[in-house]
Image (tube, helix red, strand yellow):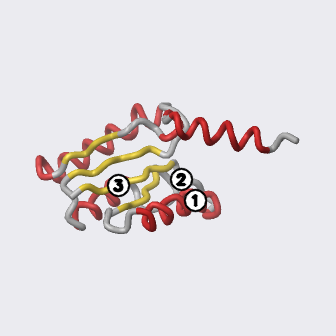
Amino acid sequence: MDGLLLFAHGARDPAWARPFEAVAARLREARPGVPLALAFLEFMTPDLPTAGDQLVAAGCTRVHILPLFLGTGGHVRRDVPALLQTLEQRHGDAVTWELHPPLGEHDSVLAAIAGACAAVLP
């Protein structure tokens, strides 16, 4: 079974996570049969390994990891591979971890952002 792990940076202010929680809620509504977890790099829980463990416990044998970042920066290049290595060591060949490009590198997201920016103009 496939699962989806959304991965965001995290912040000290709980209000910061609201948009990400809203995305997760919309996905759960749109895809009720797909196990989904929202994880954070720092300051918030769960972290990526914990969320990955939760998806494996839910029966996932392939987990799609989608960084909710605008681009491929240091966190995506350095931190995510190290966190994935932790999951691979824990779960061996029983689970495939598929890392997707950051959200901000998807054309549909860039178009939506451009549209939202244009909408503020008279």
| Residue holding disc 3 | 4
Tag nearer the camera, 1 or 3: 3
| Residue holding disc 1 | 17
Q: Give yes or no for contact between labels 2 and 1 (Cβ–Cβ under 8 Å).
A: yes
User: Residue 99 at what x, y percent from top left?
Assistant: 33, 40
Q: In the figure, is residue 66 to the left or right of 96?
A: right
Give the answer, above or below, for where 111 lies relative to 88: above
Of labels 2 and 1, earlier in sequence is 2
Q: Quadrant of residue 15?
A: bottom right
Of labels 3 and 2, earlier in sequence is 3
Q: Quadrant of residue 3?
A: bottom left
Which element carries disc 3, helix, strand or loop? strand
Q: Give yes or no for contact between labels 3 and 2 (Cβ–Cβ under 8 Å).
A: no
Residue drawn 39% across the image and 33% down it: 78
Q: In the figure, is residue 114 to the left or right of 7?
A: right
User: Residue 63 at what x, y percent from top left?
Assistant: 27, 51
Checking the image for residue 10, the label placed there is 2
Which element carries disc 2, helix, strand or loop? loop
- What's the distance in space between the residues labelled 1 and 3, CA to CA? 18 Å
Residue drawn 18% across the image and 47% down it: 89
Q: In the figure, is residue 59 to the left or right of 27?
A: left
Residue drawn 60% across the image and 36% down it: 111
User: Residue 100 at what x, y percent from top left?
Assistant: 37, 39
Mark 3 residue type: Leu
Q: Nearer the viewer, residue 29 or 4?
A: 29
User: Residue 18 at what x, y percent from top left?
Assistant: 60, 62
Q: Nearer the viewer, residue 110 or 42?
A: 110
Q: Nearer the viewer, residue 98 or 77?
A: 98
Q: Residues within 10 Å of mark 3 (few under 14, many from 20)?
A: many
